[in-house]
Image (spheres, grey):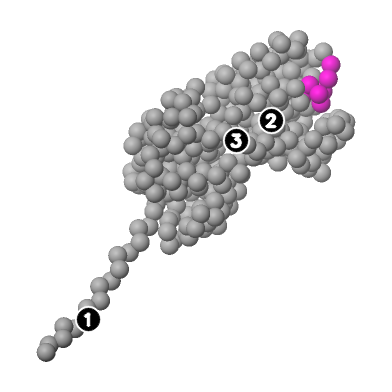
């Protein structure tokens, strides 16, 4: 009786997923599992939490603009050419990706108002190739205005710095101020070259404080804005913590590192076959009030104890 020899067949190799990452401060050379960016690092931690191992289950294709928004159209086109399965992207990268592809899934990590910006049809039913997380910074504009008025009370107006992309935030601030009888000064920023003049305009208007919309060109100029605020001795309120880390006075907004970590949940679902059009956009659940006491002392500003007690973190 002849016995057929046992033949072993190699198991098919597990698919290695390719994930694009596009943002202002994503380091293009940080293709490994330990990138320098705290945001990219947070995303990779989220992937590890879900059981993904770098280089075994997935690799990343990171691209960054180094804070120069004009680079995003070319970077978005390059990302599409790489044929990644999904792209994780933030801020000013999103409009470029919207123009570059309607097929590759895009997970948003920093969209101020994705419905108004045209990235999705609605939060509950995106209906496009884009989904992810909204920062809800337009909806919390009134809260930031209240906080800066608590910090700097009085009749002096608050100067609001905004760029065209952030028009809804200026409108939200205007509605909130009108309801409370507060005066505002509208200062539109068209490009980074307008920032120095904006602070001079705030001083000329005798503003007592500044409310900065942190997205777009203003986010990429965090350190310069903090320096100009200090130079003109203007207390400034920001949307996101990175601007306080850069020397700004105070911020109230979503925990952006947590947002990037949660983006991994969307990527996981998409890699398993879910369609972005069917995945509801998540709004942030964690907001943080961060106060920089070093900056406050430099401004000669005394922070009310009631505000210090509510702060999630006080930078000494």
What quarter of the picture does the C terminus occupy? Answer: top right
Determine whether label 1 and label 2 are within 8 Å by CB: no
**Residue 268, x across and y down, in percent:** 45, 48
Residue at x 32% of width, y 64% of height: 13
User: Which mark identifies residue 292?
Assistant: none
Relative depth, front residue between 238 and 125: 125
| Closer to the camera in the image, 257 or 3 | 3
In the rendered image, residue 170 lying in the magenta stretch gets the answer: no
The residue positioned 47% from the left and 57% from the top of the image is 52
Mark before the other along the chain sequence, 2 or 3: 2
Q: Residues within 10 Å of mark 1 (few under 14, many from 20)?
A: few
Q: Quadrant of residue 96?
A: top left
Quadrant location, the N terminus: bottom left
- Of label 1 and label 2, which has the lower sequence position? 1
Q: Give the Cα separation between the discs numbered 1 and 2.
A: 69 Å
- In the rendered structure, find residue 6 and report the number of the disc placed on it: 1
**Residue 241 visible in image:** yes
> Callout 3: 10 Å neighbours few (<14), some, many (20+)?
some
Q: Choose between 2 and 305: the one closer to the eye.
A: 2
**N-terminal of the two: label 3 or label 1?**
1
């Amino acid at each position: 009786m002849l016995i057929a020899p046992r033949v072993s067949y190699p198991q098919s190799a597990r698919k290695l997923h390719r994930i694009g990452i596009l943002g202002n401060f994503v380091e293009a050379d940080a293709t490994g599992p330990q990138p320098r960016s705290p945001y990219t690092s947070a995303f990779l931690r989220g992937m590890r939490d879900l059981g993904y191992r770098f280089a075994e289950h997935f690799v990343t294709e990171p691209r960054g603009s180094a804070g120069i928004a004009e680079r995003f159209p070319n970077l978005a086109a390059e990302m599409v050419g790489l044929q990644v399965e999904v792209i994780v992207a933030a801020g000013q990268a999103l409009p470029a990706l919207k123009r570059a592809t309607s097929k590759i899934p895009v997970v948003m990590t920093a969209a101020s108002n994705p419905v108004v910006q045209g990235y999705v049809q609605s939060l509950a039913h995106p209906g496009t190739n884009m989904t992810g997380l909204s920062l809800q910074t337009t909806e919390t504009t009134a809260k930031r205005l209240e906080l800066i008025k608590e910090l700097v009370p009085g009749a002096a107006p608050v100067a609001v710095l905004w760029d065209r992309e952030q028009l809804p935030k200026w409108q939200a601030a205007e509605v909130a101020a009108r309801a409370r009888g507060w005066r505002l000064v509208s200062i539109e920023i068209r490009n980074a070259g307008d920032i120095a003049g904006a602070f001079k305009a705030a001083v000329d208007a005798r503003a007592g404080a500044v409310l900065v919309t942190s997205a777009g060109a203003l986010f990429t100029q965090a350190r310069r804005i903090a320096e100009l605020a200090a130079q003109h001795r203007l207390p400034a309120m920001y949307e996101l913590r990175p601007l306080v880390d850069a020397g700004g006075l105070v911020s109230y907004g979503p925990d952006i590192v947590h947002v990037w970590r949660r983006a991994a949940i969307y990527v996981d679902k998409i890699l398993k076959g879910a369609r972005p059009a069917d995945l509801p956009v998540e709004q942030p659940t964690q907001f943080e009030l961060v106060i920089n006491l070093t900056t406050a002392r430099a401004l000669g500003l005394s922070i009310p104890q009631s505000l210090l007690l509510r702060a999630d973190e006080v930078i000494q």
